Image: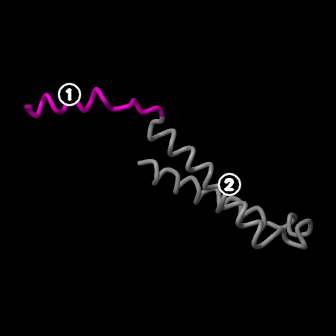
Amino acid sequence: MKTDDLISALSTDAAPQDASPRNAFFIALGVGALIAGGTFFATLGPRPDFMAAMHTMRFDFKFVVTIVLAVTAFLAARD
C-alpha cells in the first residue's frame, strides 16, 4: 500500500467534525465565565453594604476595569 492510498483510506473513515474551534472557544468562554461567577458569589457572597457602595465612584470604576481586562483578554485569547 502506498502512502497516498493509506491517507485516502484513513480520510474516508474519519467522521466529519460538527463543531468548529471558534464555536468551541465561545462555548468554553461562556461556561468559564459562569463557573467563575458562581464560584465568586459562592465563596464571597454579596457585600453587606451593597446599596451604600453603589453610590460611590469606586464601585463604577471596578466595572470599567473589569470590562477592559475582559475585552483585552478575549482579544489576546482569540488570536
Residue at 47% over, 40% down: 22
State the image coordinates of residue 71 (x, y, percent, origin top left): 57, 52
Decide: is 6 above or below 61: above
Main SS category, magenta section: helix
- Label 1 or label 2, whichever comes before in sequence order: 1
According to the image, label 1 marks what residue?
A: 8
Q: Is residue 67 above or below residue 40?
A: above
Q: Nearer the viewer, mark 1 or mark 2?
A: 1
- Give me the disc on residue 34: 2
Q: Residue at x 90, y 73 (%)?
A: 48
Q: Secondary structure at mark 1?
A: helix
**Is 9 positioned to the left or the right of 24 in the image?**
left
The answer to whether the residues at label 1 and label 2 have Cβ atoms under 8 Å apart is no
Q: Mark 1 and mark 2: span between their CA atoms?
A: 42 Å
Quarter where residue 60 is shown: bottom right
Q: Depth check: give the residue in front, 64 or 25.
A: 25
Kind of residue at disc 2:
Leu
Question: Which residues are the magenta region?
Answer: 1-18
Residue 55 shown left or right of residue 18 in the figure:
right
Asked where in the image residue 7 lies, by quadrant, the reply is top left
Q: Nearer the viewer, residue 39 or 17?
A: 17
Give the residue at x 92% y 65%.
51
Kind of residue indicated by mark 1: Ser
Q: Nearer the viewer, residue 29 or 49?
A: 29
Across and down, in percent, residue 1 comes to 8, 31
Q: Which residue sits furthest front?
A: 1
